[in-house]
Image (spheres, rainbow, N blue to C red):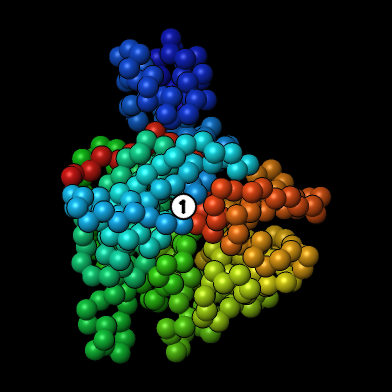
Amino acid sequence: MASKITRNNIMIADILSRLPVKTLLRFKSVCKSWRCMIGDSSLGFQALHYDRSQRKPRFLLQWPDFDFRPLEPAGCRYVYNFISIDTEGNMISPIQVKVQEPVKLILPGCHGLLCLATETRIHVFNPSTRHLVALPADGGEIAGFGIGYLSPAKGHVVVRLNIPRQSRTSLSWKLECSVFTFLPENGGSRWRAVEDGCPYQVEQFSFPAFANETIYWKIDRGKHQALHRHNDFIVSFNISDEKFQTITHPADCRPETHRQWRSPVRNSTQLVELRGHLYLVETAAFSYVAVWKLSDPGNSMWSKACTIDISKFHPSFVGEIQCVKGTEIIFNSCTRLLLYYDEENKTSRRKMLPCSAANLTIYCESLTFPATQQV
C-alpha cells in the first residue's frame, strides 16, 4: 500500500495511518509533504489508512427527531443530528447533516462513504470528513438505490432504480437503471442510463447490501402477482459488467409476507455484507435467527452459517445484524440496546446507547471523498 510513498515517509505514513481522520485533517497543515501524502489518493496512504480503519468500524447513531428550518437556504432546511460511536457504544463525536428534503433511508457505509436518499434525490456523505454532495436530479421517484466500490478503478458507483413513466399502461416493464460513477481522476459526472433494466420491483426503503462488486436488493414480492421463479427473492446488479441477475432464497428459508419490517414482534429477512460476502438473515420472533452465506451467486447456492436461539430474548432486543467483530455478532434493536452474541461461547451481553438503536448505520473511517461538480 505504501509503495508510492517515498522511503523517507514510509515510517511516518505507518504511524499516521493509525490516527483518526479528524486528526489527519489537522496534520495536513504541518508541512507540504504531509499535506500531499494525506490528501493525494494516488500515493497509497489513504488506502493504507482505510485498511486499518476496517479493523475498528464505527456506528452512526441518529437522534429520533430532526429540525425543519424553512428560512434556511435551499438544501439546508432539514437538519439531522447524529452521534458517531464505536462498536462498544462509546461516543466519539456529534455529526450534523443538512438536506433539502426529509431523509428516507441511509445505507451502510461502503469504503468510507454513506449513501442517503430523499423521495427524489440521492446524496453521498463521508461522516469522517463531513463532506456531503447531492447528486444531480434524475427525474421521478426513487424505486431503489445502492452504492458500491470498484477496486480496480478505485472509484465509487451509485446505482439508482426508477419506475418508468409508461409503467401504468404497460403490462410488462422493468425498472429503469442509472449509474453515477466517481473516479479519482474526474471532476464530476452525470447519471448514465443502463440498457439492462431491473426485472423486479425491489423493496424501496429496505437496506440493500454490497459484496464482491455486486449490489443486492430484496424483491418486493408483495407487488408481484407472479414471479419468474416461485422462489426468486433477490435481484442483484454487478457494477463491473452492469448486468442484473435474480437469486432464489435458501430452500429452508421461509420469507416473510409483506409487513412492517421494523415491528418489534415479527418474522423478517435481512441482506447484509459480512467479511466480504453476502449473507441472508432470517429472524423468527421468539424463536431463532438463521444466517445463510451466498456461496455461489450464479447458481443461487447457499450454505447455512449458523442458527442462533433467541427464545430467551424479548423480540424488541433482537434487530438486524450490523457487523461481526471477532466471535461476536452485533445486533441493533428497537430499544436503546446493542446486543452482542458470541457464536463460539453461546453467550450474550448488552450495551446501552443514548437513544434508540433502530436507526444505526455502520461505517469505517476514510479520507476518501470523490470530487464532483457543484449541484
In the rendered image, residue 225, in percent from the top left (x then y), is placed at 44, 89
- Residue 291 placed where, x, y %? 66, 63
Q: Is residue 341 left or right of residue 94?
A: right
For disc 1, the neighbor class at 10 Å (few under 14, some 14 to 19, many from 20) is some
- Viewer-nearest residue: 279 or 65: 65
- Front-most of residues 180 and 92: 92
Q: Residue at x 48, y 70 (%)?
A: 218
Q: Is residue 236 left or right of residue 166?
A: right
Residue 178 image position (x, y, % from top left):
27, 62
Q: Is residue 287 left or right of residue 129?
A: right
Disc 1 marks which amino acid?
Answer: Trp
Where is residue 281? Give x, y as percent: 62, 65
- Of 23 and 345, the residue lying toward us: 23
- Against 240, residue 89 (above or below) is above
Q: Is residue 240 visible?
A: no
Question: Can residue 234 be spotted in the picture?
Answer: yes
Q: Residue at x 41, y 42 (%)?
A: 95
**Residue located at (51% from left, 36% from top):** 92
Q: Residue at x 41, y 37 (%)?
A: 128
Please state if 6 lies on the left or on the right of 346 as rendered: left
Judging by the rendered image, the residue that carries numbered circle 1 is: 63
